[in-house]
Image (cartoon, helix red, strand yellow):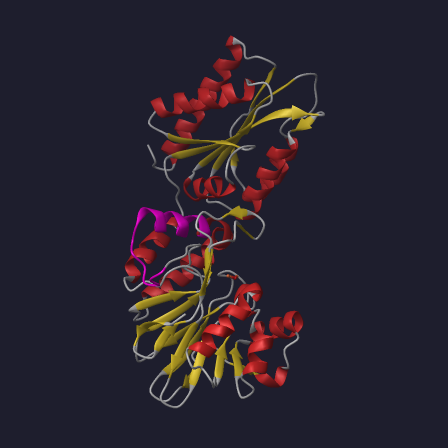
Amino acid sequence: MKFQEIIKDVYYCGLNDTERPIFDELIPLEHGTSYNSYLIKGLEKVAIIDSMYPPMIDEYFKNLDENGVTKVDYIIANHGEQDHSGALPRLLEKYPEAMVVTNATCKGNLISMLHLDENRIMIVAAGDELSLGNKTLSFTPAPNVHWPDTMFTYIKEDKLLFTCDFLGAHYTFDDVIAKPSEELTKSAKRYYAEIMMPFRVMCKKYLQVIKEMDVEIILPSHGPVYKDPKYILDLYSDWTSDLGKNLVALPYVSMYGSTKEMIEYLSEKLNKKGIDTVKYDIIRGDLGDLAMTLIDATTIVMGTSMVLAGPHPASVNIAYLASVLKPKAKFASFVGSYGWGGKLFDILGELLAKLKLDIIEPVQVKGKLTKEDYSKLDIMVEAIVEKHKSVGLL
Ligand code: FEO
């Protein structure tokens, strides 16, 4: 496959993975993903930026050969995770004169995870420059967007910024240049939810760093290249903002219908009060959809049936997921029904405690709902309205 030229002497040499159904064995992919790699042909030196996911190395190498890449001087490793670094051991064999260029943290990861020879690794720090002749690479460590070893690489003369996983999307394409669409926005949002949301504060910091740089093209490690950086930067400004939207997330699991009835009642009443809701069936839903809702939600109300004197295990899984994704929500509560007894919300509350949410009085019912139970839900609705007013959403 012929490499796509992004600007003169800068090529896309990555690959689409349209077959991959799920990422990190966690979030379903609607469009597969791409593993981006870039070839920079300087007048004196040739560099590759990020490499390839191990199962696709043979195809990657075939393309390098077909495009006449016979000598590589530098392989820039912006990050040690194997979807980008997995080809390094074989690349160093293929190009015996090449040096891996990375930061000290990533060097440690590459040696411990991939057993690279440390003599083949050159360390760079913030602001260091590497000349390819007519193109100068400079480096900006960006720890925790999303690994401690992440860094950005910038071509000064061309104002190109290679942001590694940051600003990426699980998306595949024929033309590597992004064409803004609802579909692309959704893929980038789904990607942000799983990969970047846990590091929202650092994302916000490095978003600002990028806005203060002179950048004409953003080239991430997954998804398309942005010749209009504003598109992806504006999306990230929204997603990383401190305050969520006037939205309540309602994930639930319901065995005999009472919990679902509570969720539907809450949704209808909240909507009437001018608050948006997203109901999410924990058993049948797509985790990516829930993760995207958590980017925006200001309140989370979890619904669960009781199984064996505790919350349904599927709801525990969701509470744990929320605790590690670290959404920006400020308020939470629980609803659910039980048959013979037990503790319905304790474990869920413990899991969400890390998020330091302001907890609204939960509602627990035995079997089918009574009039009194509906009144308790009305009180919960009023409490949510007041909370949203308190942060300026109503
Ligand atoms: Fe796409 Fe953190 O690897």
Q: Which residue sits at x=45%, y=18%?
A: 378
Quadrant into which the N terminus falls: bottom left
Quadrant into which the C terminus falls: top left
Residue 58 vs residue 98, the one in the foreground: 58
Relative to residue 210, is residue 124 drawn left or right? right
> Quadrant of residue 104 in the image?
bottom right
- Horizontal and vertical percent for residue 348? 61, 34
Q: Total number of numbered labels? A: 0
Magenta-colored stretch includes residue 340:
no
- Horizontal and vertical percent for residue 111? 64, 75
Q: Which residue sits at x=52%, y=38%?
A: 357
Relative to residue 98, is residue 159 drawn left or right? left
In this orientation, does residue 20 appear? yes
In this orientation, does residue 126 appear? no
Residue 89 vs residue 289, the one in the foreground: 89
In this rendering, the answer to whether 347 lies above or below 130 is: above
- Horizontal and vertical percent for residue 62? 49, 73
Which residue lies most toward the right here? 308
- Horizontal and vertical percent for residue 164? 45, 66
Q: Which residue sits at x=29%, y=71%?
A: 214
Residue 241 vs residue 164, the one in the foreground: 164
Q: Which residues are magenta?
A: 174-191
